[in-house]
Image (cartoon, rainbow, N blue to C red):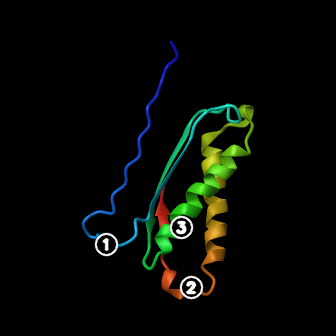
Amino acid sequence: MKDSLKIGVAVDVGESRKGKPNQDFTSVLLPGWFNQKQPLLLLSDGMGAYGGGEIASKIAVRTILKVYKHYSRKQVNYIEILERGIRTAHKKSSGNLKGKRSWNGWGVRL
């Protein structure tokens, strides 16, 4: 019998953010036909007002997943993938900040 793993995701905006958008973003990449690597589970907690944290959170997770998918199985080095993904996400999100003063101070925790 193969080992199995059940994965579930739940997020909560919390008491202080009730009625406001959830700035958390999650994603799971499981092994399969096109992905022979180990599973990757990401959770990003967005920070920032006026939707900035919500956008930053999505950019961070999607960018890290993209970087992860471009590595072949032999090249998997999770620290390097996370570092490269975080740097790339930072560049992307910094570009999205242009002209949006109200989003100053947005960011994420991974």
Q: Which residue is mark 3?
A: 56
First of labels 3, 1 by sequence position: 1
Find residue 108 and report its horizontal and vertical position in percent: 48, 63
Q: Mark 3 falls on what kind of element?
A: helix
- Is 109 in front, or is 20? 20
Task: Decide: is 9 above or below 15.
Answer: above
The label on residue 100 is 2
**Total residue callouts:** 3
The answer to whether the residue labelled 1 contacts the one labelled 2, judged by CB atoms less than 8 Å apart, is no
- On screen, residue 84 versus residue 61, left or right, reads right
- Taking 50 as reference, is 74 left or right? right
Q: Which residue is mark 1?
A: 19
The dot on residue 89 is none
Nearest to the observer: residue 5 or residue 110: 5
Residue furthest to the top in view is 1
Q: Position of residue 53 (x, y in %)?
A: 47, 70
Place of residue 8 in the rendered image (x, y in percent of width and height, measured from the top left): 41, 41
Q: Residue at x 61, y 33 (%)?
A: 31
Q: Amino acid at mark 1?
A: Gly
* Nearer the observer, 53 or 32: 32
Which kind of residue does numbered mark 3 sit on?
Ala
Q: Earlier in the sequence, mark 1 or mark 2?
A: 1
What residue appears at the point 24 percent right and 66 percent down from the top-left corner?
15
Q: CA distance from mark 3 to mark 1?
A: 19 Å
Q: Residues within 10 Å of mark 3 (few under 14, many from 20)?
A: many
Residue located 54% across and 67% down the image: 56
What is the spatial separation of the Cα atoms under label 1 and label 2, in whole angstroms?
A: 23 Å
Do residues under tags 3 and 2 come within 8 Å of each other at their CB atoms?
Answer: no
- Secondary structure, mark 2, is loop
Q: Nearer the viewer, mark 3 or mark 1?
A: 1
Choose the circle earlier in sequence order: 3 or 2: 3
Amino acid type, callout 2: Lys
